[in-house]
Image: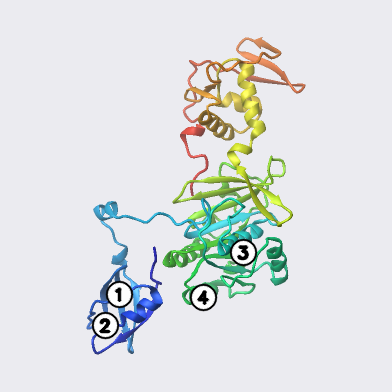
Amino acid sequence: MYSIPETAKAKYDPLNEHVLSEDFAHNYGTPITSKIDIHNGIVMVPTDRGLYEVHSQEGTITVVPSSQSRQFTLSSLLSTEFPELIWYVDRLITPGLSLLWGYAKSGKSILALHILVDIVLGRKVLGTLAVKQSSALFISLEDGGRRLKQRLQAAGAIGSDNLIIHTDWSRGTEGVRELELFLDVHPAIRVVVIDTLFLFSKLPDSNDYSSTISLMETLKRVADDRDICIIALHHSKKSGREDSTDITQTALGSTGIVSGPDHLLYLKRTPEGPTDAVLFFRSKDAEPAEIALTFDSTIQGWRYAGEADEMADTDERQEILELLRRNQGSMSTGDIADALRKKKAAVSNLLGRLVKKGAVRKLSYGIYTLPSGESCNPCNCETEGSKEVFHQDQETRTFTVSPLTQEVDAEESEGEDQAQVPLF
């Protein structure tokens, strides 16, 4: 899939009133062969990309996409065949605007650099994810040449002219225009990384929704017009409150930062988990992913450690299974959350995944038990009316056992019946 730039200069033959198709095809990949009428100065020209307006001035024309070329009727939209998504990194990087963020020193710049090197060299990202080999641009406004060289050498990079690195770039509106011109001169570049978004944009206030959404829309337009990937690096909030059920709340600045991009990538360090970090991927166009990562000091970069839902929360899942065994019956999501002192939403998500794996059986809305035939290990329990008290790790926990006939709160969330993370 390809797209015309927002404006494109092409030579004009005043005698035959034709665009010189060879020139246009050479620069933008498609000819305009239809005779045009410039009597009124602005006309519609049919091309293989749709209708485009033509503005004549001093022997040249400017071809711009017409708003009519983006117009659909319900019937035409439903009958339109759109191409499959192109993955420059399987499951993670596809055309459009992406935002990659994490805490300072979390390793996001290293991750982005390694992704570009692997795309350019045709190597698997994180040692396992397939790539579509292409040229790339890295606008590095935080790290200079010396540091980048050291990181590239550690990553085992070999020489290639297909990765262009800039350690300085114009900022703000001028920087966007410079990026557009650079991409027009280097059409082979399909992936761009900007490190970081705020250094590039010179936004005076990251909490200003109007300014941030305008910035994201501008970068998205640059990506969409060329059908390329632009990945903007960003920082997390410093509050320390990270709710994995809504990663969008962790990004620094207004909601415009996370609502504008097509795709979100959140690198979360997990020092107390089974791996070093989890990379969350959320998209308006593709399936979500959560990939567990380990940091390899030999390459000073990240490696694939497995799927996060299979590796993370291992202790919590075991606690749920043990609790159901101890209870020797069924329990509601709320009861389990209270007993384990966990957030209800997090427990609901874990229960949903356990149901899909067959480790837990869902009896009714919000009520769970072990699968039929699963042995219930006896425990040192005492019964107090409708309550059960058991001893675990020298600590007594009390919870209410809801009977199956008890009405479940209608507002209770279900892990397998809803999206685990809100899509922005």
Whether residue 205 can be seen here: no
Q: Which amino acid type is marked by label 3?
A: Thr
Q: Which mark is residue 18?
A: 2
Name the residue located 71 percent from the left edge and 61 percent from the top edge. 154
Q: Which residue is mark 1?
A: 53
Which residue type does callout 2 highlight?
A: His
Q: Position of residue 312 (x, y in %)?
A: 63, 38
Q: Nearer the viewer, residue 319 or 308?
A: 308
Asked whether residue 155 appears in the rendered view, the answer is yes
Q: Which residue is mark 4?
A: 182
C-alpha distance separating marks 1 and 4:
24 Å
10 Å crowding of disc 4: few (<14), some (14-19), many (20+): few
Q: Mark 1 to mark 2: distance in Å?
A: 14 Å
Q: Amino acid at mark 4?
A: Phe
Which of the two labelled residues, at mark 3 and mark 4, occupies the earlier sequence position? Answer: 4
Q: Secondary structure at mark 4?
A: helix
Question: Where residue 400 sits: x, y (%)?
Answer: 60, 18
Q: What SS does tag 2 mark?
A: strand
**Location of residue 158 by image quarter:** bottom right
Q: Nearer the viewer, residue 297 or 16?
A: 297
Q: Secondary structure at mark 1?
A: strand
Q: Which residue is mark 3?
A: 196
